[in-house]
Image (cartoon, grey):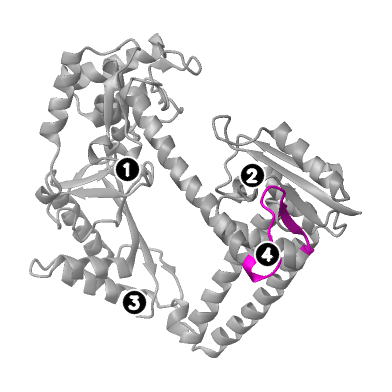
């Protein structure tokens, strides 16, 4: 008598497939007729789980792990249909091959018997292809059903801030504490004239948070202002993100809902009219609108975020403040910043004391072989992560995980040894002295103070000398961090 296992899976109650109990009964009857012993420990059941992806099926992964264990507890896996094992042909072939070659375990469909030989393998591939085609076609049917439900005002998306989910088939109800936030956003924007960033900042300062408990940003305010749910409508736009799309007009569906509106239609329209008036097309944005020789180099002294350059505003502002997350403005005009940077360089040249950080030349500069070894070490790290995931998901046993980890560790040590030898062969990097740095400061000063030099040249020279520049608006101070990364 051979030992076997049973794998039972049902996706949804609405699909044309046998129930778990019916599959179990048929599999055990087949096992009894064919002298196959099935232990209750090796009956794997998954209910309400799709077969498209094996890594999302915990019982499937537990079954594969058991098959690969040293005990080898079963010789075959019985399924009602091959579609129960997998609906993805690629995964079906991979796992069947793994079970056969490494574990000597066969996968047998009791309702789809196959003949031996190459013709039987061909029939098996055709069955797998049909199963995958059915799964893809089913996703299209599901999408059509969701679209129809949206047209009829059905609720099938996350309930937004201001409302409470009351269970399947019920109507969301208003949460008054959250609804007051929604009313404030619309009134502040459409009636008081506040911008989205200012609204986000005021909400954060008052201790208010989003549905997920995060700080408000400009984009959160815009999402609220555009959401027709607040006037009693339902918006459904899953089609653009799916592989199935019946008609272009189905991309966004807006229908009347049964829930209580929080915002009046007239207020909603005024808010969105202002949004449209403030929006700019992609063509209206200049390609060089954010280009400045100090862009990406200046940081906020309060939160450490970079200051973004805006040509229309004529200056730099902390991007976190611009989004409403950071509560303190760090704005400085580009003209003032340029003058302050040039004045700072003049102070260095006049004898102001400074410290500096030196970084040795990057490895590619020490030789092509060194860079190649560094890339190989990076690949080792990626392989170690995959080995760890395979163990955590039950695909590899503890012994296999230890063996693979030891093998990769030895490979890492070998590469590190070669890398060390290559670095030792390379010419020693020399840390530049203070006088050499002052000469580079002079060169940078000559370039950035020259109005005829282009932005790119100025920016590149600044980055060779400075890691970043912190701006403290409260005290009106610039702090330069000198970072030398090459011999000068």
User: For mark 2, what is the residue?
Assistant: 57
Residue 112 at x, y = what percent? 66, 51
**112 vs 226: above or below:** below
If the image is split into quadrants, where does the N terminus sit? bottom right
User: For mark 1, what is the residue?
Assistant: 245
Q: To which quarter of the image does residue 420 belong? A: bottom right
Front residue (pair 317, 226): 226
Q: Secondary structure at mark 4?
A: helix
Marks 1 and 4 close (CB-CB < 8 Å): no
Q: Read off the magenta span.
A: 103-119
User: For mark 4, what is the residue?
Assistant: 97
Marks 1 and 3 close (CB-CB < 8 Å): no
Label 4 Cα neighbours within 10 Å, binned few <14 / some 14-19 / many ≥20: some
Q: In the shown orientation, is residue 471 left or right of residue 284?
A: right
Residue 227 visible in this rendered orientation of the protein: no
- How far separated are the C-alphas under marks 1 and 2? 28 Å
Marks 2 and 4 close (CB-CB < 8 Å): no
Q: In the shown orientation, is residue 269 left or right of residue 179?
A: left
User: For mark 3, what is the residue?
Assistant: 435
């Amino acid at each position: 008598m051979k030992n076997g296992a049973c794998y039972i899976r049902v996706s949804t109650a609405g699909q044309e497939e046998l129930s778990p109990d019916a599959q179990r009964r048929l599999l055990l009857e087949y096992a009894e007729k064919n002298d196959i012993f099935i232990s209750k420990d090796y009956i794997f059941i998954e209910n309400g789980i799709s077969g498209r992806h094996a890594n999302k099926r915990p019982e499937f992964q537990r079954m594969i792990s058991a098959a690969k264990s040293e005990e080898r507890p079963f010789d075959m896996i019985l399924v009602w249909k091959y579609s129960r094992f997998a609906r993805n042909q690629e995964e079906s072939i991979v796992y069947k091959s793994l079970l056969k070659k490494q574990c000597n375990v066969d996968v047998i469909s009791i309702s789809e018997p196959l003949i031996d030989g190459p013709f039987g393998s061909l029939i098996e591939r055709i069955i797998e292809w049909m199963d995958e085609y059915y799964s893809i076609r089913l996703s299209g049917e599901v999408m059509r059903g969701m679209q129809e439900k949206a047209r009829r005002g059905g609720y099938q998306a996350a309930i937004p801030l201001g409302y409470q989910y009351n269970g399947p088939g019920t109507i969301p109800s208003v949460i008054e504490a959250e609804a007051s936030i929604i009313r404030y956003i619309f009134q502040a924007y459409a009636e008081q004239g506040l911008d989205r960033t200012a609204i986000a900042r005021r909400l954060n300062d008052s201790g208010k948070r989003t549905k997920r408990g995060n700080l408000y940003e400009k984009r959160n305010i815009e999402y609220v202002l555009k959401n027709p749910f607040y006037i009693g409508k339902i918006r459904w736009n899953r089609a653009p993100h799916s592989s199935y799309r019946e008609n272009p007009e189905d991309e966004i569906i807006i229908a009347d809902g049964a829930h209580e509106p929080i915002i009046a239609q007239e207020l909603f329209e005024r808010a969105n009219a202002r949004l449209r008036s403030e929006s700019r097309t992609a063509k209206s944005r200049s390609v060089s609108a954010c280009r400045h020789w100090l862009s990406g180099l200046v940081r906020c002294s309060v939160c450490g975020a970079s200051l973004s350059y805006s040509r229309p505003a004529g200056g730099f502002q902390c991007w976190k403040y611009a989004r409403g997350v950071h509560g303190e403005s760090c704005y400085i005009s580009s003209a003032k910043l340029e003058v302050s940077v040039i004045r700072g360089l003049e102070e260095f040249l006049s004898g102001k004391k400074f410290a500096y950080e030196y970084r040795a030349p990057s490895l590619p500069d020490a030789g092509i072989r060194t860079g190649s070894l560094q890339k190989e070490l990076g690949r080792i790290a990626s392989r170690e992560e995959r080995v760890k995931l395979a163990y955590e998901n039950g695909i590899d046993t503890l012994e296999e995980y230890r063996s693979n980890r030891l093998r990769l560790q030895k490979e890492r040590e070998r590469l590190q040894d070669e890398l060390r030898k290559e670095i030792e062969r390379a010419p020693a990097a020399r840390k530049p002295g203070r006088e050499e740095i002052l000469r580079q400061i002079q060169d940078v000063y000559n370039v950035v103070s020259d109005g005829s030099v282009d932005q790119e040249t100025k920016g590149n020279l600044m980055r060779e000398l400075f890691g970043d520049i912190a701006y403290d608006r409260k005290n009106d101070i610039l702090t330069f961090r000198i970072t030398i990364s090459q011999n000068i």
